[in-house]
Image (tube, rainbow, N blue to C red):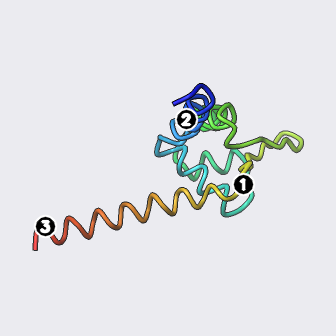
Amino acid sequence: MDKNEKLKYEMQAAVIKALAHPTRLFIVERINREEICMCRLAAEAGSDITTVSKHVALLKQAGVVRVEKRGTQIFPKLKCVRLNRLLETVDDVLRANARDMQRATA
């Protein structure tokens, strides 16, 4: 692996690491469905605004989201809406694993 490949994989790992938390996955899926402010996002996540803000900041640092301010409200937005394909692929893996488990116990 050369330096450019290594850098690419390190950057990919940083994005995947940023996604690797249940609340952050919820945030990504939720803001992919529709525009939602941070206060409502926190309520739906069952967390306080400070915690959700920290999760959004981490996603922003990884380049997954950007934030849009309107007055006192903050709206996180996905930078790449195709991110849902990654999550759909993860769901495909989970379904395949469930089928394998069913076959193994049958």
Quadrant for residue 56, please give it: top right
For this rendering, which residue is in front, 48 or 86? 86
Q: As drawn, is 92 to the left or to the right of 53?
A: left
Q: Amino acid at mark 1?
A: Ile
Q: Amino acid at mark 3?
A: Ala
- In the displayed structure, 83 sits above or below 10; it is below
Give the farthest residue toward the right.
71
- In the displayed structure, 47 sits above or below 54; it is below
- In the displayed structure, 13 sits above or below 44; it is above
Element carrying mark 3: helix
For this rendering, which residue is in front, 77 or 104? 104
User: From mark 3 to mark 1, how far is it between C-alphas?
Assistant: 42 Å
Report the mark closest to the observer, 2 or 1. Answer: 2
Q: What residue lies at 61% left-to-right and 45% top-to-bottom?
A: 42
Residue 30 percent across, percent down from the top left? 62, 57
Element carrying mark 1: loop
Q: What residue lies at 53% left-to-right and 35% top-to-bottom?
A: 13
**Category of crowding for the residue at label 3, using alpha-carbon neighbours closer than 10 angstroms: few (below 14), some (14–19), many (at least 20):** few
Residue 36 percent across, percent down from the top left? 72, 54
Whichever of callouts 2 and 3 sits on the residue coming sooner in the sequence is: 2
Residue 22 percent across, percent down from the top left? 46, 45
User: From mark 2 to mark 1, how far is it between C-alphas?
Assistant: 32 Å
Report the residue marked by disc 1. Answer: 36
Report the residue marked by disc 2. Answer: 9
Q: What residue lies at 29% left-to-right and 62% top-to-bottom?
A: 97
